[in-house]
Image (cartoon, helix red, strand yellow):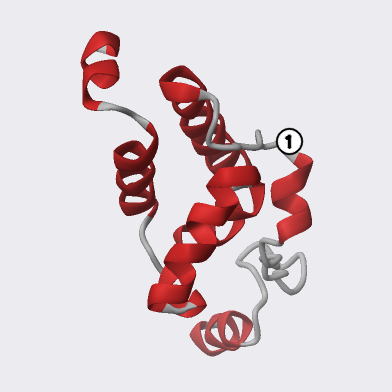
Amino acid sequence: MAKAEASRVRNGYDSNGSGPRLAQTVREYTYPDFLKCQPLNFKGTEEVIGLTQWFEKMESVFSISNCTAACQVKYAVCTLQGVALTWWNSHVKTVTLEVSQALPWKTLKKMMTDKYCPRGEIKKLK
């Protein structure tokens, strides 16, 4: 009896004898998955409230879509437009694309806050 149970477990059969257990397939997270959640674009002209809304929506998209930490900056910067995109491209030129995309989300948020939010405006929000 013990041998039969060990064989069942080893061969992937569950204990109630209903057949092999199917492994859950984890699908890779993709950029189209990210876009389906309708992230906001950021142009760099929206001031503090616009940047704050962009951060909040982006974090909501990350959460809803189960975006991995490795993809967060890579996908988020694809929503930059206008002067914000120019600023990002300048950053990429100084440190390379690979290094830029490997930044943690918190680091990108700090960089963007430093760039697009005057100190006095941030204090008004608190």
Return the x and y of residue 98 as percentages of the image width and height: 48, 78
Report the residue at 75% width, 46% height from top. Answer: 35
Position of 8 with respect to 17 (left or right) is left
Circle 1 residues within 10 Å: few <14, some 14–19, many ≥20: few
Q: What SS does tag 1 mark?
A: loop
Tell me if residue 51 comes above or below residue 86 in the rendering.
above
- Residue depicted at 76% across the width and 65% down the height: 18
**Residue receiving disc 1:** 38
Residue at 60% x, 85% y: name it.
4
Q: Quadrant of residue 26?
A: bottom right
Image quadrant for the C terminus?
top left
Residue 67 visible? The answer is: no
**Residue type, label 1:** Gln
In this view, the residue in front, 11 or 6, is 11
User: Which of 24 and 45 lies nearest the eye of the viewer?
Assistant: 45
Which quarter shows the N terminus? bottom right
Q: Quadrant of residue 27?
A: bottom right
On the image, the x and y values in percent for residue 66 come to 57, 48
Q: Nearer the viewer, residue 67 or 100?
A: 100
Residue 48: give x, y in percent of width and height.
41, 22
Q: Quadrant of residue 14?
A: bottom right
Residue shown at 60%/88% (left/top)? 7
Figure check: 124 above or below 80: above
Q: Residue 67, how many percent across, how many down?
A: 56, 52
Q: In this picture, is 34 found above or below 23?
A: above
